[in-house]
Structures are given as C-alpha cells and as structure tokens.
Amino acid sequence: MEIRELTVPGSYEVTPKLIGDDRGLFLEAYRHDRLEAAIGHRFTLAQGNTSVSRRGVVRGIHFADVPPGQAKYVSCPKGAVLDFVVDIRVGSPTFGTWDSVLLDDVDRRAIYIGEGLGHLFVALSDDATVTYLVSSVFDSGREHGINPLDPQIGLRFPVEAGEPLLSPKDAAAPTLADALAQGVLPSYHEVLAFNATQAAR
C-alpha cells in the first residue's frame, strides 16, 4: 500500500494494492506497521463503527477533546463518499484549511485522521457504507461539532452529491469562529505533546 500525507498535517491517504483475478479481488485494507511508520506512533484500535447513508448525507464536522482525542481510519467498502479533514487545531500553521479524499468501492482508499482534527464526509451514492476504526471509545461528553456549511471553512461538495442533508445536531453546530470563541477547539501544541507521548510508548 501507498501512504501519503495530505495538506493538513496529521492526516494521510492510504491507497492499497488491488490484486484481482477471475475469482474476485484481494487487498490489505489496514496494516498497523505501515501506518505506524507513516504517522510516527502507534494507532491503538479501541472501537469500530459503521454508517450507511443516502446520497447527499453529510456527517460532521466532528472532533473530540485532546487528550485523548479520537484518531480515525476511515474507508468506504460500498458506494462512494468524499471524505474531508479540517484543521481545527488552535495555533496550527494550517488552521482552518482542509483536504479531501474520494473513498469508494473501486480504488478502495482509506484516510487516516489524527487526533485533534475535524472529520466529515458527504455521500455520493445511495447506501454509501463507511467504516471507522477509532483510537478511543465514544464519549458524548467529549465529542463536539462544527457546522459543515460554515462559509469561513468553505468546503466544496461535488455536484453529484445534490442538496446537503444534515442531522439537526450538525445543522445546529457552531461555526469555526464560534467554536474558537467558546474555547472547545483542540490546541495544536497539546496535540503535538500527546502524539509525542504516543511515540514514546
């Protein structure tokens, strides 16, 4: 597999090698050693989640308090989504910027999103199935959101996604500026310090 860092530091695109023949297809969807070599510390798997979405559904922008945060390894075994990572780490040189990766059942890429980064996707097909391997279990008291339609962030959704469909919770989430004023955004330096403790283990 090939792993490359995205323009938002701490996030990576993972492209597996597809081995196919007349029987079907085989790929390594996840390799802990390859990922650890790329990100510089261990990715501890604590929980696995799956969502199924109709075309146009937007899930996010979601993030968790650091420490421990919640790193994510995300793939789409059925259908297609455009997956986004947003730098919401206060003090980061790339604060407020974003990058995206097409996840689908053709190229079967994955995306790794490190602790302290915002995550969302928009479904490009009906029954888009997304799997998330995450580094910490869900804790509602430590989970937060930012409105994915915030013009300051300026996410661009593909035309084929149609009209964005948000949950009431995501639609009511604060803008990036409001979340910053509320003091709920992760600190870039705290994220770096946490990652350093992970690497030292």
Image (cartoon, grey):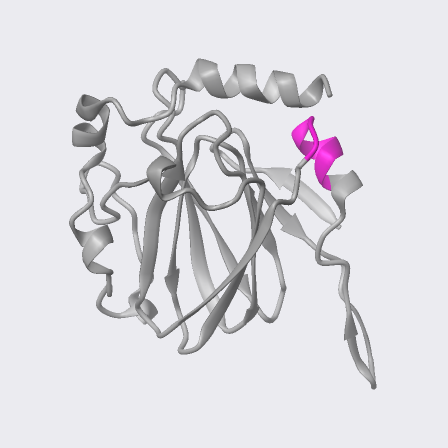
Q: How many marks?
A: 0
160 sits left or right of 137 in the view = left
Q: Quadrant of residue 29?
A: bottom right
Q: Quadrant of residue 86?
A: top left
Q: Is residue 39 magenta?
A: yes
**In the depicted structure, whether residue 167 falls above or below residue 52:** above
Q: Residue 106 placed where, x, y %?
A: 61, 70
Q: Quadrant of residue 41?
A: top right
Q: Residue 21 placed where, x, y %?
A: 83, 79
> At 76% across and 48% down in the image, what residue appears?
31
> At 18% across and 42% down in the image, what residue appears?
151
**In the depicted structure, whether residue 58 falls above or below residue 70:** below
Magenta stretch, main secondary structure, is helix
The stretch in magenta equals: 35-42
29 sits left or right of 62 in the view = right
Q: Which residue reaches farthest bottom? A: 22
**In the depicted structure, whether residue 140 falls above or below residue 160:** above
